Image (spheres, grey):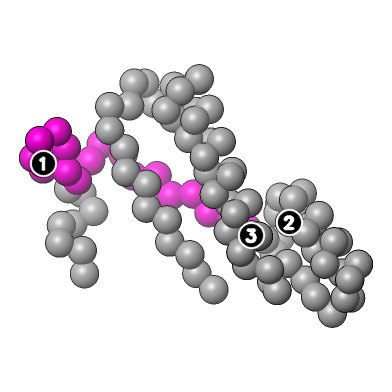
C-alpha cells in the first residue's frame, strides 16, 4: 500500500498538498479503436510467423505506449496547448498489466 492516499502528493519542499487532477490514460489493443502502430506490429510479426500477434511482443507495445504518453504530455499538458493551464508539478506513474 502506498504511504499516502492518491489525493495527496508531495509538493515544494516535501510538503503534502491535495492533488487537483488525476488523469488515467490507457491503451486498447483489442478493439477497432486500437492504434495503427499495433496493427503494424502485428503485420510485421505475422510476416515472420503467422501464429504470432502483438501479444507476443509486450516490450514493443510498452515502448509504443510510453512514446504516445510522452507526446501527449509534452503537447497538451506540459507545453504547447497547455489545455490544463500552467502545470507547476506533475507525477507520472506507469502501471503495466499482462
**What residue is pinned by disc 1?**
14
CA gap, disc 3 and disc 2: 7 Å
Q: Is residue 22 magenta?
A: yes
Quadrant of image for the N terminus = bottom left
Answer left or right for 84 relative to 48.
left
Q: Residue at x 73, y 56 (%)?
A: 38
Are circles 3 and 2 on residues that touch, CB within 8 Å?
yes
The picture quadrant where one finds residue 71 is top right
Instruction: Give the vertical position of 12 relative to 58 (above or below).
Output: above
Are there few (<14), some (14-19), or many (20+) residues within 10 Å of tag 1?
A: few
Q: Residue 61 bears which disc, if any?
A: 3
Mark found first going from the N terminus, 3 or 2: 2
**What residue is pinned by disc 2?**
38
Magenta segment boundaries in residue numbering: 9-28
CA gap, disc 1 and disc 2: 40 Å
What kind of element bears circle 3? Answer: helix
Q: Where residue 94 appears, x then y in whole percent?
A: 42, 56
Q: Residue at x 20, y 63 (%)?
A: 2
Mark found first going from the N terminus, 1 or 3: 1
Q: Residue at x 44, y 30 (%)?
A: 77
Q: Where residue 11 appears, x then y in whole percent?
A: 16, 37
Which one is closest to the eye, mark 1 or mark 2? 1
- Of residues 49 and 86, the one nearer the viewer is 49
Q: Where residue 97 appears, x then y in whole percent?
A: 50, 69
Instruction: Give the vertical position of 39 relative to 13 (above or below).
Output: below
CA gap, disc 1 and disc 3: 35 Å
Amino acid at each position: 500500500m502506498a504511504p499516502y492516499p492518491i489525493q495527496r502528493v508531495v509538493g515544494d519542499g516535501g510538503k503534502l498538498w491535495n492533488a487537483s487532477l488525476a488523469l488515467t490514460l490507457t491503451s486498447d489493443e483489442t478493439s477497432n479503436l486500437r492504434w495503427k502502430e499495433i496493427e503494424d506490429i502485428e503485420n510485421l510479426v505475422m510476416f515472420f510467423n503467422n501464429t504470432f500477434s502483438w501479444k507476443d511482443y509486450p516490450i514493443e507495445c510498452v515502448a509504443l505506449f510510453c512514446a504516445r504518453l510522452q507526446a501527449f504530455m509534452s503537447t497538451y499538458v506540459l507545453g504547447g496547448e497547455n489545455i490544463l493551464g500552467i502545470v507547476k508539478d506533475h507525477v507520472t506513474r506507469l502501471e503495466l498489466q499482462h
